Amino acid sequence: MKFVNIVTSLFLIMISINCKYAFEERGYVIANSGLSFRQSPKADSLRLNIIPRDEFFLILDKEGPEDTIEGTTKRWWKVNYNDQIGWIFSGFAAIYDPSFYDVKKSLYKGDLSIKVEFYNELKTFFSKKAENHCQLNFVSNDFPSGDGDETFDEVYTIEINTKIDSMVVLSKYNSFSVRITNLEHYKDEIVISYVNSDQRVGNSISTIAWVLDKDKKTFFNREQLGKGTWWTNLIYRPNDEKSYICNSHLKSWLYPFLQ
């Protein structure tokens, strides 16, 4: 009987722990200069620390007093950062939503070892290393764009999400997302098969081959480089200024296709 009681107690403890983690809500800092972590919910209270950009914290209470800082009106949040309790102004933070980035939403059907190798190689291109490095942001070389009356230096950015094997390609006037279905490694090239999520394009599979230059930490398509200003004609380098947390444009671009 004692054994049964012990097992039952352990089972209830495990359920309690799992429920606790299930209801935990995490946030992260979006301010470039970091966010003050204070003793009380006041802008002039004792600063305990500065939470760097992209760092996670555990949200304990979102109903702190409302405040206006630098023209932004939001509430103070009570949070746990590095096992210390304090307050942050939520106007420069965001809530992390991991449910959207469920690995089951990936369309990838290829060799898992090649995928891991590819993502790990791209991660080494960045000077900034983070545990939450689930999003890899790259920016292209610039090129002239405009309608003749107004010209500007345009770039494409690529945000690769390693959780759901998807990319969003962004420029000022043209943005779309693609979902990776397969990766193949040939000598110094990675061949990417993908489906464009734009419903107007359909579900046909396209491919692009990237050469990864480990020394210069860039990648490009050897056959198409310099032959135009489409996203496939450019050379890309890591964009260390951007966030690595899964909070990218992918959510807005892909949401209708991941139901």
Image (cartoon, rainbow, N blue to C red):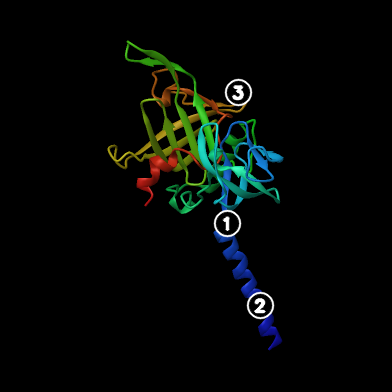
Q: Residue at x 40, y 18 (%)?
A: 227
Q: Residue at x 63, y 35 (%)?
A: 34
Identity of the amino acid at label 1? Glu
Secondary structure type for disc 3: loop
Distance between mark 2 and mark 3 Cα atoms: 57 Å
Furthest residue toward top: 149
Assess whether mark 1 and mark 2 are in contact (beta carbons under 8 angstroms).
no
Q: Earlier in the sequence, mark 2 or mark 3?
A: 2
Q: Residue at x 64, y 30 (%)?
A: 127
Q: Earlier in the sequence, mark 2 or mark 1?
A: 2
Furthest residue toward bottom: 1
Near-viewer residue (10 or 102): 10
Circle 3 crowding by C-alpha within 10 Å: few under 14, some 14–19, many from 20: few
Q: Which residue is mark 3?
A: 216
Distance between mark 1 and mark 3 Cα atoms: 41 Å
Q: Which residue is mark 2?
A: 9
Identity of the amino acid at label 2? Ser
Which is in the foreground here, disc 2 or disc 3? Answer: 2
Identity of the amino acid at label 3? Lys
Visible in this render: residue 118? no
Residue 212, position as x, y percentages in the image: 55, 29
Q: Which residue is mark 1?
A: 24
Circle 1 crowding by C-alpha within 10 Å: few under 14, some 14–19, many from 20: few
Residue 102, position as x, y percentages in the image: 48, 52
Horizontal side of residue 5 vs 139, given as left or right: right
